[in-house]
Amino acid sequence: MAAVWLPALITAMGMLRPLAWCWVIVVGLAGAARAQVAASPQAVTLKQAARGLFDIGVGVNDRIGDRPADHALLLAQFGVVTPENCMKPAKVQAAEGRWDFEQADAYVEFANKNGLKVVGHNLVWAKDDRTPAWFYLDGDKTASREVLL
């Protein structure tokens, strides 16, 4: 049924075609999940519905290893995790040259032990509360565009 209206939707979306394709993927997954639910008395997880298409991921608390009550849902539904803050610059290198990977390492260790892939954050985070002030300096002056890049 979706195939009848799908081309019209994508054409109508114009510049928003990537958004249309996201919608198509969601609708397709919902259809696949419905078909699997009809064939099986057990509910289908997000991870099962997307198997063979793409991985399903979620942003998770940095201390997920210390939150066993959340593990069953996480492991049933998702195959990829992204930490909230423990891999952002403010946590990993709050002061220039002083590195702290303790929490990031614990996060990756939890993921590895549970068969989860980890997607880290970008190297520069635009929010000021997650990027230390020293990132924006070149010595005692404001860093130029060239230095920042």
Image: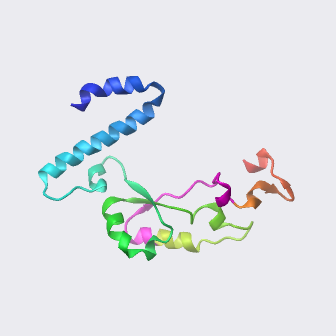
> Residue at position x 25%, y 29% from top?
3
Q: Is residue 26 above or below residue 41?
A: above
Q: Which residues are magenta?
A: 110-131
Question: Does residue 123 belong to the magenta stretch?
Answer: yes
Question: Does residue 88 belong to the magenta stretch?
Answer: no
**Percent x, y of residue 146:** 78, 45
In the rendered structure, the answer to whether residue 43 lies left or right of residue 82 reads left
> Residue at position x 64%, y 60% from top?
130
**Percent x, y of residue 68:** 38, 75
Q: Is residue 99 above or below residue 33?
A: below
> Residue at position x 44%, y 34% from top?
18
> Residue at position x 17%, y 46% from top?
35
In the rendered structure, the answer to whether residue 60 lies left or right of residue 147 reads left
Looking at the image, the residue that sits furthest to the right is 140
Residue in front for this viewpoint, 56 or 59: 59
> Residue 132 appears in which quarter of the rendering?
bottom right
The way the protein has been coloured in the rendering is rainbow
